[in-house]
Amino acid sequence: MDKRKDVLTTGQVAKICNVAPRTVSKWFDSGQLRGYRIPGSKDRRIPVSQLVRFMRAHGIPLNGLDGGATRVLLVDNKADIRDAVAAELGKSDRFEVQTAECGFDAGILADQFRPHIIFIDLMLEDINVKRICSIVRDSIELQGARIVAITSNLTEGEGNALLQQGFDAYLCRPFDMKQMIDCIEDSLAIVY
């Protein structure tokens, strides 16, 4: 997996925002878009986290940041399920999928991969539901990420309790790929 750039040039920002590079320079020089200058140069650099804040504040669509692919992180300790879901979603260029088998691996991957949506199997032993939701919500890099619980046999009340704890949605096993894709699209429609 390629490491995504954390810092962009004004030309890269202009392409993402679909504006002229001079417009980005004006945003930077007026203090609207935060970043820094390269020492000994007039070149400007904009951290991706600052660009995301700016884009959200000004209603600029975020899809230019990723080329349109939705990044999905699946956290499940069952290798057959992880592999099947990753293979199925990977058939479409609409999705970029990474998987983790435990909460620790998920944390490392989330920091590097910066998923749009995280599916978490609540049956994992090392999962603290409230802690995961609060970590994701407090992270600048994961600010827009949606969190979906995967579990079995939930009552409507238990499902609503998950939503109150910070999850954006939940999927009950067994589910098919159409239900998962619908969940991705519904969850991300809230953000964009």
Image (cartoon, rainbow, N blue to C red):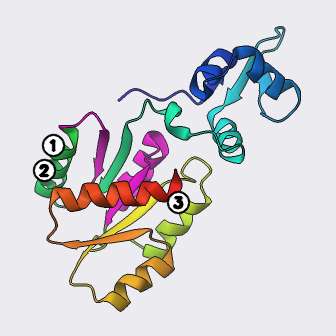
The residue singled out by tag 1 in the image is: 87
Magenta stretch encompasses residue 134: no
**Mark 3, residue position:** 136
Q: Is residue 134 above or below residue 50?
A: below
* Front position among marks 3 and 1: 1
The kind of residue tagged 3 is Val
Residue at coordinates 30% horizontally, 54% vertically from top-left?
74
Q: Tell me which corner region of the image, top left, top right, bottom left or bottom right, holds residue 20.
A: top right
Q: Nearer the viewer, residue 173 or 188?
A: 188
Q: Position of residue 166 (x, y in %)?
A: 50, 73
Q: Is residue 101 visible?
A: no
The mark nearer the N terminus, 2 or 3, is 2
Q: Which residue is mark 2?
A: 84
Crowdedness near tag 3: few (<14), some (14–19) or many (≥20) residues, C-alpha within 10 Å: many
- Please give the range of residues in magenta: 91-120
Marks 2/1: CA–CA distance: 5 Å
- The foreground one among 168 and 86 is 168
Residue at (33%, 71%) from the top-left corner?
Answer: 170
SS at mark 1 in the image: helix
Q: Position of residue 152 (x, y in %)?
A: 21, 79
Q: Amino acid at mark 1?
A: Ala
For the point 15% across and 54% down, the residue is 79
- Along the horizontal axis of the image, is 143 left or right of 181? right
Q: Residues within 10 Å of mark 1 (few under 14, many from 20)?
A: few
Q: Earlier in the sequence, mark 3 or mark 1?
A: 1
Residue appearing at x 38%, y 43% in the figure = 71
Q: Amino acid at mark 2?
A: Ala
Q: Is residue 84 left or right of residue 36?
A: left
